[in-house]
Image (cartoon, rainbow, N blue to C red):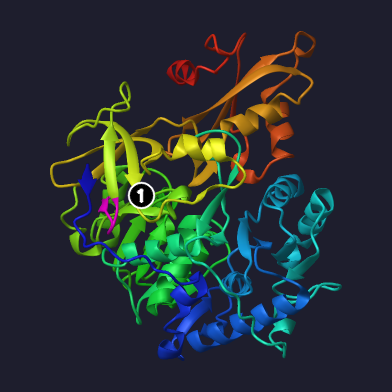
């Protein structure tokens, strides 16, 4: 068993809004959130006051403890206010990909039993359609303004009393992001107030921040990585978060330059751009002190090229998953120069790890040997919503969460993730479940069978690659037709990027697709 070098942290038994904004009065007029596109700024005092007023308005509208509110928005400076207002009103927040189709959104609404939606006007048509398909949604609010819908801006004027909700941090669900876990279609991950808040305390000794630090939030808040590293963690510590709605390289570089960004939390595609794109040389990025990459594996050579070009310490990595609130490992800021290339870091405070044999899961392996990574700690999810069997398959009776990732630890405690047991595809940090795409492909009348695996392109991005068996009557079915069929029915990050026609999908006697054979043939 491997244990963290850091001292344990006590469980944080606070609602997430109090855990994050407890020092808002102390930070006062320090900018908490800055819109990276137009400069609109909210101070800590304003974020605290605004989220309380919106919570009062939500409660007045009928939001009650135990309700689920779907937050459907790109990154904006209103997103944190909406999130903390909902939790203060007693609701659980299920975060929704802003590029989700109405059908995908409706599935999440139904599964989570969401009764309320907060969205933005450009996404309103999708939200309305999703609500119609799902049923049960009482009202759709907007962060900005739209005819016929109440706005969070108008809610700031609410004179309703602030809700006084009795929240049990150890049991009550603060966030319900959706993850595919080790296999299958997306499932609601139940993260309690205590689990999220404690994970912030666990991360703090390794990656401290404070007033004067400026973090650029370009990775999405709806994703647990963005929610933690770019929203909850910096706002808990008095840092300033500069918010961008999406990644556009020129806009991203200009924001680093103009807002004197000191820290970047990114995914590998952004590291690639910083390492290789000619536009980088046109901007002053000298304010940067460090970069941390997570959400997908980062090639050590690419990390080195990025740090050398920018004159920074080596790009650090972090490791975790939605089911872990999400963090378990990070390269500490004070050890970036000493970390071996390719490591995802060391165990954060209060976290234990085992590396177990793939052939004999009960056998623990020593340092240097590769096996499945198991994690135990206070940040482990409460479980999958409504799926006790899936929860039991993920978390064993002794409390160890089986990550599905393969890795090894060196003698100094640095973890290296080398492969995945699980079948998920990580496209630019977003999870894509092969089973979901396979089920969709099989709805095409010209497809007899299909399998999907991840295929790496020249830039190191893993993308969905479909192996398709045509129906005898559909000999003329083309790659373009299949790619279009899928693209019309899924969010952009889930699109099929390659198609190979085969005579039969390799399967075991049980019927399970033998993906390894497909990977080897690729």
Residue 181 in view: no
Query: Percent from the top left, x then y, of residue 421?
Result: 41, 30
Which is nearer the eye, 77 or 261? 77
Residue drawn at point x = 55 percent, y = 81 percent: 39
Specify the farthest residue to the left: 411
Which is nearer the eye, 388 or 182? 388
Residue 331 sits above or below residue 424 on the image: below
| Left or right of 266 on screen, residue 435 | right
Residue 258 position by quadrant: bottom left
Query: Percent from the top left, x then y, of residue 63?
Result: 72, 70
Residue drawn at point x = 65 percent, y = 68 percent: 65
Residue 403 in view: yes
| Left or right of 386 on screen, residue 286 | left
Query: Percent from the top left, x then y, of residue 344?
Result: 29, 48
Secondary structure beneath label 1: strand
Residue underneath mark 1 = 319
Span colored in magenta: 344-351
Judge the density around disc 1: few (<14), some (14-19), many (≥20) Cα neighbours within 10 Å.
Answer: many
Query: Percent from the top left, x then y, of residue 161?
Result: 68, 87
Query: Was residue 222 drawn as part of the magenta stretch in this picture?
Result: no
Residue drawn at point x = 32 percent, y = 73 percent: 209
Residue drawn at point x = 72 percent, y = 91 percent: 159
Quadrant of image for the N terminus: top left
Query: Was residue 349 drawn as part of the magenta stretch in this picture?
Result: yes
């Amino acid at each position: 068993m491997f244990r963290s070098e850091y001292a344990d942290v006590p469980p944080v038994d606070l609602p997430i809004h109090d855990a994050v904004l407890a020092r808002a009065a102390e930070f006062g007029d320090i900018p908490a959130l800055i819109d990276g596109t137009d400069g609109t700024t909210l101070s800590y005092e304003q974020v605290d006051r605004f989220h309380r007023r919106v919570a009062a308005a939500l409660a007045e509208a009928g939001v009650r403890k135990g309700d689920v509110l779907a937050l459907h928005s790109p990154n904006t400076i209103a997103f944190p206010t909406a999130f903390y207002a909902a939790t203060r009103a007693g609701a659980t927040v299920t975060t929704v990909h802003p590029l989700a189709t109405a059908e995908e959104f409706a599935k999440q609404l139904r599964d989570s039993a969401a009764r309320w939606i907060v969205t933005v006007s450009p996404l309103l048509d999708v939200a309305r359609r999703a609500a119609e398909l799902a049923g049960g949604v009482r009202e759709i609010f907007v962060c900005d303004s739209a005819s016929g819908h109440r706005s969070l801006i108008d809610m700031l004027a609410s004179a309703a009393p602030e809700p006084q909700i009795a929240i049990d941090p150890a049991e009550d669900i603060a966030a319900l992001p959706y993850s595919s876990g080790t296999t299958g279609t997306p499932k609601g991950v139940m993260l309690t107030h205590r689990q999220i808040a404690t994970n912030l305390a666990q991360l703090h000794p390794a990656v401290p921040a404070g007033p004067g630090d400026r973090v650029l939030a370009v990775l999405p808040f709806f994703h647990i990585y963005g929610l933690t590293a770019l929203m909850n963690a910096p706002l808990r510590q008095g840092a300033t978060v500069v918010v961008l709605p999406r990644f556009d390289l020129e806009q991203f570089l200009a924001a680093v330059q103009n807002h004197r960004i000191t820290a970047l939390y990114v995914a590998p595609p952004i590291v690639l751009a910083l390492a290789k794109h000619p536009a980088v040389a046109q901007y002053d990025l000298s304010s940067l002190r460090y970069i941390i990459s997570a959400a997908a594996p980062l090639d050590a050579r690419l990390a080195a090229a990025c740090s050398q070009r920018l004159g920074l310490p080596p790009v650090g990595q972090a490791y975790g998953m939605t089911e872990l609130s999400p963090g378990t490992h990070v390269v500490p800021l004070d050890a970036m120069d000493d970390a071996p290339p390719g490591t995802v870091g060391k165990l954060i405070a209060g976290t234990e790890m085992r590396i177990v044999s793939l052939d004999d899961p009960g056998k623990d392996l020593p340092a240097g040997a590769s096996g499945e990574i198991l994690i135990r700690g206070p940040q482990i999810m409460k479980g999958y919503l409504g799926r006790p069997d899936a929860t039991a398959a993920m978390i064993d009776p002794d409390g160890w969460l089986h990550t599905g990732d393969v890795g090894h630890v060196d003698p100094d405690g640095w973890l290296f993730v080398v492969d995945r047991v699980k079948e998920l595809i990580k496209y630019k940090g977003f999870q894509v479940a092969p089973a979901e795409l396979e089920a969709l492909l099989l709805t095409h009348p010209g497809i007899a069978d299909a399998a999907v695996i991840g295929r790496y392109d020249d830039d190191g991005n893993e993308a969905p690659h479909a192996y398709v068996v045509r129906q005898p009557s559909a000999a003329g079915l083309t790659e373009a037709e299949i790619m279009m069929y899928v693209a019309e029915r899924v969010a952009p990050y889930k699109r099929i990027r390659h198609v190979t026609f085969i005579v039969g999908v390799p399967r075991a006697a049980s019927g399970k697709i033998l993906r390894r054979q497909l990977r080897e043939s690729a």
